[in-house]
Amino acid sequence: MITACSKIVYKIYDFCSGLIYPNFCFYCKDFLQDKSIFCESCKDKIKPVVTTNLEVTNKYKVKVFSISEYKYPVKSLVLAKGGSDIVASRKLGELAWEMTYIKNVDFDFIVPIPLHWKRYAERGFNQAQEMANIISKNSGKPVVNLLKRVKSTQRQSELSPVGRALNVHDAFFLNLKQELKKNYECKKILIVDDLLTTGSTIKFATKVLIELKPESFTAIVACRVI
Ligand SMILES: [Zn+2]
């Protein structure tokens, strides 16, 4: 009886909050009846991308999942970071959890690809970190900021494939005290980033994390540029 009453109360609450805070499709701005990110027609445009394997060393490969190609409607959420829309980045985390295989992947902790402090200061947040926080909330696995970006790199999208590799070479180091390393050894790591182009960023980040002798690497990105 109490459960039935609570359900009715929640439904009334949802209805009223929908009137006060109406929800719109993030891409086409159509009115939505519920708290979805996209309307059904925009959601239908999101096509799955074939999972790719990045070979980092003979021993380590990174399986990379992505929500979509770098196309609308998901692209609109990625680009919203330029307008300092932190909520859009969190929505990417929700979509990653809802629409990709990562909810079935076994991992111990989550490592977001960091921004250099200068770009972080410009934007006020890191899209990959926001996605990682949402994945953590859904999976119950912690986010550990094991990487630090030491080089203020150019935007990868502005460079040639060779330029991209050089750009992120030596861009990261392991942000962990020597005596704490053993706590993170032999684990399954999930790396999170917003975009995958040539894969150079994830490869170099992985090379740094190999120092922890992990069991495996998986990565999730919002969009893959194909
Ligand atoms: Zn729509």
Image (cartoon, helix red, strand yellow):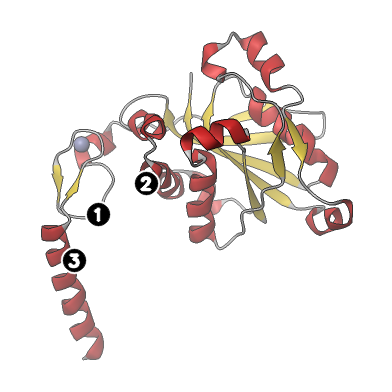
Label 3 packing within 10 angstroms: few (<14), some (14-19), many (20+): some
Q: Secondary structure at mark 2?
A: helix
Identified by mark 3, the residue type is: Asp
User: Dot 2 corresponds to which residue?
Assistant: 87
Q: From the viewer's perspective, is residue 24 above or below residue 152?
A: below
User: Residue 13 occupies which quadrant of the picture?
Assistant: bottom left
Quarter residue 136 falls in: bottom right
Q: Amino acid at mark 1?
A: Lys
Asked which secondary structure carries label 1, the reply is loop
Q: Is residue 40 left or right of residue 153?
A: left
Residue at 17%, 56% (x, y): give it: 21
Whole-percent x, y for residue 39 in the image: 21, 42
Q: CA distance from mark 2 to mark 1?
A: 13 Å
- Counting residues from the start of the chain, the first of labels 3 and 1 encountered is 3
Q: Residues within 10 Å of mark 2 (few under 14, many from 20)?
A: some
| Quadrant location of the N terminus in the rendered image | bottom left
Answer whether residue 74 is visible to the viewer in this image. yes
- Mark 2 against mark 1, which lies toward the viewer? 2
Residue behind mark 1: 35
* The one of 42 and 51 positioned closer to us in this rendering: 42
In the rendering, at what x and y percent does residue 77 appear? 36, 35
Q: Nearer the viewer, residue 40 or 141?
A: 141
How far from the left and from the top, in percent, is residue 79? 38, 29
Amino acid type at mark 2: Val
Q: Are marks 2 and 3 in contact (CB under 8 Å)?
A: no
Nearer to us of marks 2 and 3 is 2
Residue 5 rendering spot, x and y as whole percentages? 18, 85
Residue 60 seen in the current view: no
